[in-house]
Structure formats: C-alpha cells, structure tokens
C-alpha cells in the first residue's frame, strides 16, 4: 500500500516568517514557534477549543512549515532481491525539490529510514519546487548513495531549468571541479500514464497556477494522479491519490479526465492547495478549495465517496495550524455551526463585484490584538467565505483537514 508523507506544507517563503519573528507585533502563528523565554514569543492562544491545542495541533511545532513537498513510498514489482538475498526495499518517489528540501531531508530521511531516491516528480519551475535539485549531489556525488536520480518534468519545466541552471540538465556545462548531481531527465506528457519502478502509475494533469503578468496567459503547473500497479488484496479496483499542490483554477478538461478515471478507480485521498481563506492570484483560497472538493466528490458528506479525505497544503503565515483544525472541523456539518452573521449577511459570489470589506485580522487570526487569535471568529468568517463561494451547495459537508510537516496518508 503506497504511503505519502508531507515533507513540507507551507507556501514558497516557508513558515515562520522572519519579519514576524523579529517584531513584537508579528503574528501569533509565527511568534509561537520562538523558544521559551524569547521576548517576542507568544503562548498558546486562549480562545477557541482547548482540545485543538492539546491534542491535534502538535503544540506550536506545526506552525513551522517547509515548502510544500512530499515523499511517496511504495512496493516495487515484488520480485526483486538485494545482494543479501532479501526482498528489496520499498521504492521512494519525491514530489518537488524546493528551497527547503535539504533541511527537510536531513530531518525526515533518517527518522523514516529512507536513503535512496528512485525518482523525482516536478510540478513546475518555481523556486519552491526546483531550487533543491542541486542538493541531490548529496545522493549522487561519487556514487555516495546512488549513481543518478531520475527526474520527471514537463517540457516547459525542463526548458526553464535548462535556462536557469544549464549544468543540471547538461553536465557538460558544469564548471570548476564538476561536482554536480547526476540526473536523468524524462519528459511528462499530460494525460499519458507512465510507471515508476514497476509499482506506481503516474498521470500528469496541467492546472492553472496563476497567470503571466506580461501576457495574462495561464501558467501551467502539473498535478498528479498516483495509482498502485500492484494487485489489491481487498478490492477489485485500485485506489488512487490526487495531488494538486499549486493551483488557482482546475480547467474543465481536467475535471473530465478525473471523472473518467473514477469510472475504473476510486480516488480515496486528495492533497489540495489552500493558501488562506480568501482566493489568491496563484493559489486556491478555502472557498475554491471546498468547491473543488465537492466537484471531485472526495469526502463529500452524502456523496458516492463519502469516506474519502482531503488534506490541505501550501499555507501562508498568520493563521495557526490549530485554527485551521478548528475551522476544518466545522466544514463536516456546516448546519451544526449557526453563524452570528446569519445567512442574510452572506452574499453569493455571482452577485458580488468585490470581496466583502472585513478587516484583515478577521481573515487571518479572528482577533484584533497583535500576537493573538480567536479561532471561533476565524472559523465563522471562513464558513461565510465558503458559503458565498459555492452558494448552491453551502450546506454540503466535506471531510477536509490541514496538513502538517511529517503527516502521512496511505491509499
């Protein structure tokens, strides 16, 4: 059974933010990560449900988030043996290799007993997805761990890396001692399945991740459908995981492809982008994220795949993990959480010309006070945004939770 472990769940700048850590007026989420006794540190927030802090927030450690990145471990073909005659290890697939990969790998690889990297999938060519590629020399230099690493990317991502770091795609362009990673490149063609190490089928799905400022053209980023190729011992069909880590819009053809895939497979897990409550030019806000979950029918209450589960990633600073936990709980049964705002204070998105004029503190912390948060106010505002965004399905509950660095899911 494949397992996906999140090595990072933060946005491109990672969390905490340096400007919050060094300011006595910085946000609660960032300042809560400072060591005890630091003059800018804040304690556990006093508002909201106490058990969220104590049981599910993981303390303030879960307010630390590296760039969104994941490792998938899965059995290979099952008939390989190593030099000692024992069955071979599970295979390891890395999804994205960004600015914080080196730090996160030093933390997670030894703790999980990981060593070799069998393949890397790249979603796009932004810094938070590719700037760790040079660090793969730690695996390949002088064959220290392995001879080379296979990299899978779109043609656009390959071309961009070739322009920015030519030695990564053509070792002949290295200088000095030539101590560069040994990478073998493979081009992903959208919608064309390919198999990694005999055990995992991958399909690349191009989605929108913002637009070019000069032309207004959509910037494409790859999402992935991951499906085990080994026979299931419990079901007649193979379960799949859908990975959409950087997305501002899902084109109609992608929904069509996913719906066709669901005719023969069950998508039981989704990893989905959500930067904050309000929508962003390059990322889903919570309204668009919940709308996508309902469209995909993964973990929708009363839906055909009600037992599915969506994990949100790509968070910005200002909102703590515990606040996201508290809010996501309320999306399971929206009607159980009456709002003091009342339905009359929410307006369908189609009737609004601009976002509602609430102050910024409502959107991020729910508290007017620096370094504090009110999770009940934050959750109430979030539900209002979800209601406005997807008005006709405003009472349809969803199974969704915030991811955290080190979290694992199986499918």
Image (cartoon, grey):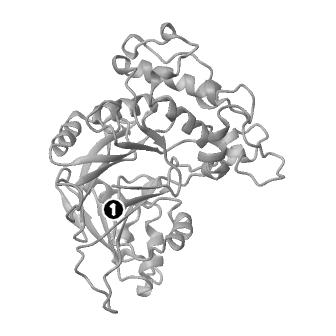
Residue 375, position as x, y percentages in the image:
63, 31
Residue 16, position as x, y percentages in the image:
64, 49
Residue 390, position as x, y percentages in the image:
37, 22
The residue that appears at 35% across and 58% down in the rendered structure is 122
> Looking at the figure, which quarter contains the N terminus?
bottom left
Q: Secondary structure at mark 1?
A: loop
Taking the image as shown, residue 344 lies to the left or right of residue 34, namely left
Asked if 372 appears above or below 234 in the picture, the reply is above
The residue that appears at 38% across and 82% down in the rendered structure is 146
Residue 303, image quadrant: top left
What number of labels is visible?
A: 1
Residue 351, image quadrant: top left
Taking the image as shown, residue 53 lies to the left or right of residue 264, namely right
The residue that appears at 78% across and 46% down in the rendered structure is 41
Front in this rendered view, residue 119 or 334 = 334
Residue 95, image quadrant: bottom left
Q: Residue furthest bottom?
A: 84
Front in this rendered view, residue 104 or 308 = 308
Front in this rendered view, residue 224 or 110 = 110
Asked if 111 appears above or below 28 in the picture, the reply is below
> Looking at the figure, which quarter contains the C terminus?
bottom left
Q: Residue furthest front?
A: 234
Q: Assess disc 1: are there few (<14), some (14-19) or many (≥20) residues with their C-alpha within 10 Å of its C-alpha.
A: many
Residue corresponding to mark 1 = 2
Q: Residue furthest top?
A: 344
Residue 270, position as x, y percentages in the image:
35, 45
Taking the image as shown, residue 217 lies to the left or right of residue 288, namely left
The residue that appears at 54% across and 71% down in the rendered structure is 111
Asked if 307 appears above or below 121 in the picture, the reply is above
Asked if 1 appears above or below 296 in the picture, the reply is below
Front in this rendered view, residue 94 or 235 = 235
């Amino acid at each position: 059974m494949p397992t996906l472990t999140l090595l990072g769940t933060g946005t491109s700048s990672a969390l905490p933010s340096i400007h919050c850590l060094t300011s006595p007026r910085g946000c609660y989420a960032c300042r809560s990560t400072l060591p005890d006794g630091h003059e800018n540190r804040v304690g556990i927030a006093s508002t909201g449900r106490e058990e969220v802090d104590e049981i599910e927030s993981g303390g303030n450690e879960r307010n630390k988030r590296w760039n969104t990145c994941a490792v998938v471990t899965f059995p290979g073909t099952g008939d390989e043996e190593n030099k000692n005659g024992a069955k071979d290890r599970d295979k390891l697939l890395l999804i994205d290799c960004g600015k914080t990969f080196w730090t996160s790998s030093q933390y997670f690889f030894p703790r999980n007993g990981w060593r070799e990297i069998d393949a890397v999938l790249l979603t796009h060519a932004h810094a938070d997805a590719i700037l760790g590629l040079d660090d793969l020399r730690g695996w390949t230099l002088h064959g220290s761990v392995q001879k080379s690493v296979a990299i899978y990317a779109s043609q656009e991502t390959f071309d961009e890396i070739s322009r920015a770091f030519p030695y990564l795609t053509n070792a002949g362009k290295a200088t000095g001692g030539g101590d560069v990673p040994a990478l073998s490149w493979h081009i992903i063609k959208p919608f064309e399945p390919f198999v990694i190490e005999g055990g995992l089928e991958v399909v690349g799905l191009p989605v929108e991740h913002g637009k070019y400022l000069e032309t207004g053209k959509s910037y494409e980023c790859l999402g992935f459908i991951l499906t085990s190729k080994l026979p299931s011992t419990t079901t007649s069909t193979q379960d799949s995981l859908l990975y959409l880590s950087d997305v501002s819009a899902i084109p109609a053809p992608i929904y069509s492809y996913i719906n066709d895939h669901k005719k023969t497979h069950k998508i039981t897990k989704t990893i989905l982008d959500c930067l904050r409550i309000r929508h962003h030019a390059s990322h889903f806000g919570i309204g668009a994220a919940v709308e996508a979950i309902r469209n995909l029918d993964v973990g929708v209450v009363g839906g055909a795949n009600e037992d599915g589960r969506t994990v949100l990633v790509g968070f910005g600073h200002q909102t703590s993990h515990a606040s996201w936990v508290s809010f996501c709980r309320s999306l399971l049964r929206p009607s159980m959480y009456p709002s003091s705002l009342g339905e009359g204070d929410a307006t369908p998105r189609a009737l609004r010309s601009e976002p509602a004029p609430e102050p910024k503190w409502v959107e991020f912390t729910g508290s007017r006070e620096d370094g504090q948060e009110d999770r009940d106010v934050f959750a109430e505002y979030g539900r209002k945004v979800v209601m406005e965004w997807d008005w006709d399905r405003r009472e349809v509950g969803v199974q969704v939770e915030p991811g955290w660095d080190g979290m694992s899911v199986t499918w």
